[in-house]
Image (tube, rainbow, N blue to C red):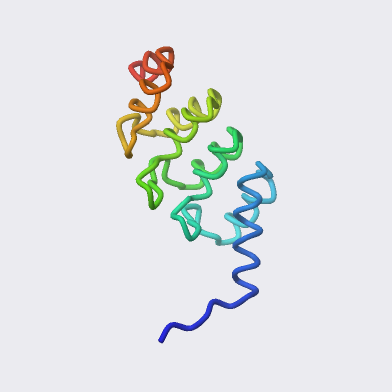
Amino acid sequence: MTEAPDPEVVELATKIFDLARQGQTEALVAYVDAGVPANLTNDRGDSLVMLAAYHGHAGTVRALLARGAAADRVNDRGQTPLAGAVFKGEEEVIKALLEGGADPAAGTPSAVDTARMFGKTELLELFGAH
């Protein structure tokens, strides 16, 4: 029998995921610096980096990567933060992830596949440079 999660822990986790979505870098990294795992994931496997990347927050992505978050952590659907950023057209986030070591070929569909799907040839050139 599984014990129900502590409501206070769920509330705190929800707050932390919201900080990533909103790009509230300073508050988010304060939690990470205090011990919240940089690779914390939600119930769909979305990491803090994935949420920040998908919502266009390059500074938050860089701060999380600097604290040890994985650039290529896939969610439960096999998607990477880089593929999400390509889908959303977030060029600064794409650059931050590439600088942080993200692999354009990782995930399903990969960032390369996503760029091809949407005809973003300039991104394919950018991926080739990394």
Residue furthest toward the bottom?
Answer: 1
Q: Check the picture and name the quadrant holding the C terminus.
A: top left
Left or right of residue 116, residue 94 in this image: right
In this orientation, which residue lies closer to the viewer: 31 or 124?
124
Q: Closest to the observer: 68 or 13?
A: 13
In the image as oriented, which residue stretches furthest toward the front?
Answer: 117
Residue 115 vs 122, above or below: the answer is below
Residue 130, relative to residue 57: is it above or below? above
Image location (x, y in percent) of residue 13? 59, 62
Instruction: Return the residue nearer the eye: 94 or 119.
Output: 119
Quadrant of residue 127 in the image?
top left
Q: Total number of numbered labels? A: 0
Q: Where is residue 115 drawn, in percent x and y?
A: 40, 23
- In the image shown, does 69 or 3 lie closer to the viewer? 3
Query: At 47% from the left edge and 35% from the top edge, which residue is drawn?
Result: 84
Image quarter in which the N terminus is found: bottom left
Residue occupying the point 46% across, 28% down: 86
Q: Is residue 109 left or right of residue 91?
A: left
At horizontal 41% and vertical 49% (from top left) the residue drawn is 75
In the image, residue 15 sits, relative to residue 98, either above or below, namely below
